[in-house]
């Protein structure tokens, strides 16, 4: 992936503020997210963390209007009712990279990335003069430009993940939501994707919201951390405020130590299992 400084004007729209209050979501009549609230601000990266089943992805999908809430207020820039906007208008403001997208057959990488331009196109795909340039920028930013003409069925999981991300970037929205975006990526591309998230926020003012399982990655990339447990937001603040040893230990049900990385100065976490602390073994030397 290229850095944002290598691709000028990579994302054209200004960032939007997306706020949600009173979010309650139910599956089969059972509430799985309870009266949640959070705000994504332009120029900030907000990371949702928490145990499996805590409601992170459900809350993110609700912000993207892919999950119908039982109750919610969704505002864009403080005064626009996000739930009342038409699909195309909403999609020009908010994009979501979901988990587990199917692999389409018979399409090239460029074809898939071009799907991100659908909010700007009229009938028969017309009326999008910026489309080609937007797709080219997205391909460059995600490091898949050299794969543009390759069939997506021949890609690895990591390559395909970057192609789907490119489609979201081609959508040119002011809010970008990412549901476990580092899935399938090797170490290099995990780091580069996290760097790209920061570039989008810092250099282009995009409001970025992401679900991450790796607490160290969350601390490294996030301006704000939203911690969920059993469908409720239990903490919302800076990494230093939220990712404390006591709170993480209580939330995850396992001992979690927190200290500062001596190289970067950022928070570093470590879950401690039964075999992680070795006792002194008796000497067998006579």
Image: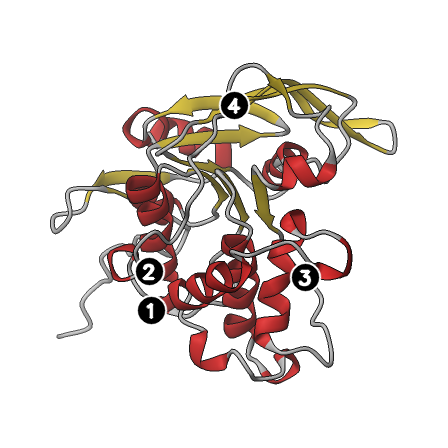
**Left or right of 124 in this view: 132:** left
**Left or right of 239 in this view: 46:** right
Which residue is denoted by mark 3 in the rendering? 101
Could you tell me how many numbered marks the image carries? 4
Which residue is denoted by mark 4 in the rendering? 38
Measured as percent of width and height from the top left, residue 134 is found at 48, 58
**Where residue 191 is drawn, which disc sits there?**
2
What quarter of the picture does the N terminus occupy?
bottom left
**253, 19: nearer the viewer:** 19
Between the C-alphas of marks 3 and 2, the distance is 22 Å
**170, 257: nearer the viewer:** 170
Between the C-alphas of marks 4 and 2, the distance is 26 Å
CB contact under 8 Å: marks 3 and 4: no
CB contact under 8 Å: marks 1 and 2: yes
**217, 22: nearer the viewer:** 22
Mark 1 secondary-structure assignment: helix
Which residue is denoted by mark 1 in the rendering? 188
Q: Measuring 60% from the left and 64% from the top, which residue is drawn there? A: 114
Measured as percent of width and height from the top left, residue 42 is found at 40, 31
**Where residue 72 is drawn, which disc sits there?**
none
Q: Residues within 10 Å of mark 1 (few under 14, many from 20)?
A: few
Measured as percent of width and height from the top left, residue 120 is found at 63, 49
Between the C-alphas of marks 3 and 4, the distance is 26 Å
Mark 2 secondary-structure assignment: helix
The residue lying furthest to the right in this view is 28
Q: Measuring 71% from the left and 25% from the top, which residue is drawn there? A: 83
Measured as percent of width and height from the top left, residue 95 is found at 58, 45
Q: Quadrant of residue 155?
A: bottom right
């Amino acid at each position: 992936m290229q850095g944002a400084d290598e691709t000028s004007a990579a994302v054209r729209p200004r960032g939007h503020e997306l706020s949600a209050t009173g979010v309650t979501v139910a599956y089969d009549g059972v509430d799985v997210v309870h009266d949640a609230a959070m705000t994504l601000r332009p120029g900030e990266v907000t990371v949702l963390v928490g145990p499996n089943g805590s409601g992170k992805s459900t809350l993110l999908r609700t912000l993207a209007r892919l999950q119908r809430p039982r109750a919610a207020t969704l505002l864009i820039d403080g005064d626009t009712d996000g739930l009342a906007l038409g699909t195309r208008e909403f999609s020009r403001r908010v994009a979501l990279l979901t988990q587990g997208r199917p692999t389409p057959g018979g399409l090239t990488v460029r074809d898939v990335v071009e799907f991100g331009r659908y909010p700007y196109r009229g009938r028969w795909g017309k009326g999008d003069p910026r489309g080609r340039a937007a797709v080219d920028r997205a391909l460059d930013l995600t490091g898949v430009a050299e794969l543009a003409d390759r069939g997506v069925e021949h890609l690895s999981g990591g390559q395909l993940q970057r192609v789907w991300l490119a489609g979201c970037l081609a959508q040119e929205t002011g809010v970008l939501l990412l549901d476990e975006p580092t899935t399938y990526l090797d170490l290099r591309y995990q780091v580069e994707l996290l760097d790209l998230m920061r570039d989008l926020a810092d250099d282009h003012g995009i409001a970025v919201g992401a679900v991450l399982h790796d607490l160290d990655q969350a601390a490294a990339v996030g301006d704000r951390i939203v911690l969920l447990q059993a469908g409720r937001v239990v903490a919302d603040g800076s990494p230093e405020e939220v990712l404390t040893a006591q709170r993480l230990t209580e939330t995850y049900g396992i001992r979690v130590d927190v200290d500062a990385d001596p190289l970067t100065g950022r928070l570093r976490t470590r879950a401690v299992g039964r075999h992680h602390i070795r006792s002194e073994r008796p000497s067998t030397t006579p």
